[in-house]
Amino acid sequence: MIRAAIERLGANTTNLVHELGHITSFGAATARGVARPAFWLLPRLVREIFDTGVLSLPIVLLSGVTVGMVLGLQLFWVLTVFGAETSLGGVVGATLVRELGPVLTGLLVTGRAGSAMAAEIAVMNSTEQLDGMKTMAMDPVRFVVGPKSLAMLICMPLLNGLFICAALGGTWMIAVKLLGLDSGIFFQDLYDGVDWEKDVVGTMIKALVFGALVALIATYRGFTSGRSAEEVSRATTSTVVTASVWILLADFVVTSLWKF
Amino acid sequence: MSKATRDFIVGLFVVAGLGSLAYLSLQVGGIETNGEGGLELTAEFAEIGGLKERAPVVVSGVKIGRVKRIELTQDLRAVVVLDVNARYQIPIDSSAAIRTEGLLGQQFVALEPGAEDALLKSGDKIAYTESALSIERLVGDFVHGNDLENEKKSEE
């Protein structure tokens, strides 16, 4: 019995190393594909940016405004206790730019676009479209996975910026229009509290890292999924779960390495 | 949806996204633009308290620049490098003081203009400085009596 348990542990470890190696070489192949651009792939990229970025925009903006409003409402009353409601702008700005913006955008995009990306590639795989491409000597990693990954990498920082701006707008609405904080004080404290080099560059680095992670996990899960309907749904679910966990883990790593 | 419409929407999305990043960088983040700054002054202080980089530099309460760097000299005095808008003319005998906004607010550098006709140039050092007021030290002096009295007691 003990021997069986140890065997299982050994098998799991080997599988883990095997999968890590596989995902790394898959990522490297994608990077090589993206690094060899072709002009006729550009319409494909525009299409993918539409699917990933534009279609994620409503939920990202709506969540942004809501998160900003809630932050404004909660923090305003906490800060009022210390008579420090004038520093609301800086607190909300730093929170959104450093953490909430990139992490929530990453999670939302994973749910909205990452799952769709995995499902699309998985269905292409199960209906043997990818095999068809291979038969015609077209590399599916370069022509299918490449544009999708690049679109995710481009969209994530843009959506992150839009999320943060929408959230700041939400906070402004609550703090200034509803609770009567002075608009000038709000913006002055916001501009003083957020640093370009530390905070804004940091948020873009986070967005790029999360974009790369979501793209890699979604395309890999789709590409390696089985051919049954069940396997397609499993690939989609696994994408959302794995990518969400990795976004949160990577957030901690980037935060501790970057000079926040 | 026609291809042209989709291209247009994607273009709008990219422009809006880049616009939001530009707003965050230029306005919220306050990235250094060429318009501001230009006149770099240094000032030595014995105590800078809680002064931070990017703290405002003001004259008569009007912001004219910001603290660029804070360093330490060989003899362990604090050197504060100020980045002041070059269109302001600051007399050579001006003095710099570290003040606090309110009782517990953030600290800033206040310049007190002098009377000389000669002006400070980039790289110059402000000769007269007034260190940050440490509330803890004030309370300490008040509780334990001032330094002179302590010295007398220790001599007795």
Image: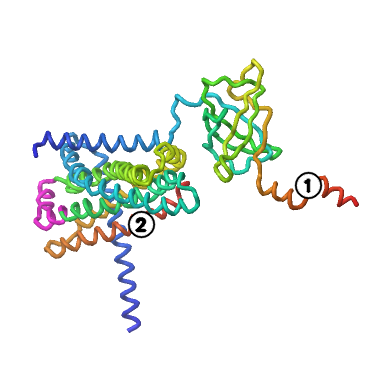
| Residue in the image at 28% along x and 60% along y | A242
Label 1 crowd bin: few (<14), some (14–19), many (20+), radius 10 Å: few
Q: Relative to A56, does residue A8 appear above or below in the rendering?
A: below
Q: Relative to A220, does residue A163 appear above or below in the rendering?
A: above
**Residue A26 seen anywhere in this rendered image of the structure:** no
Mark 2 vs mark 1: in front? 1
**Residue A247 seen anywhere in this rendered image of the structure:** yes
Position of residue B81 in the picture relative to residue B77 (left or right): left
Rendering colour mode: rainbow
Q: Residue furthest top?
A: B117
As for residue A134 lying within the magenta part, the answer is yes
Q: Relative to A201, does residue A244 appear above or below in the rendering?
A: below
Q: Looking at the image, which is closer to me, B84 or A14?
A: B84
Q: Looking at the image, which is closer to me, A103 or A22?
A: A103
| Residue in the image at 48% along x and 48% along y | A84
The residue tagged 2 is A248
Q: Which quarter of the figure has residue A15?
A: bottom left
| Residue in the image at 16% along x and 63% along y | A231
Q: Looking at the image, which is closer to me, A232 or B103?
A: B103
Q: Residue furthest bottom?
A: A1
Same chain for the residues under marks 2 and 1 in the image:
no
Work out how far the residue at label 2 is from the one at label 1, CA to CA, in angstroms.
54 Å
The residue tagged 1 is B146
Please state the extent of the stretch shown in magenta in the rendering: A120-137
Q: Amino acid at mark 2?
A: Leu
Q: Relative to B48, does residue A76 appear above or below in the rendering?
A: below
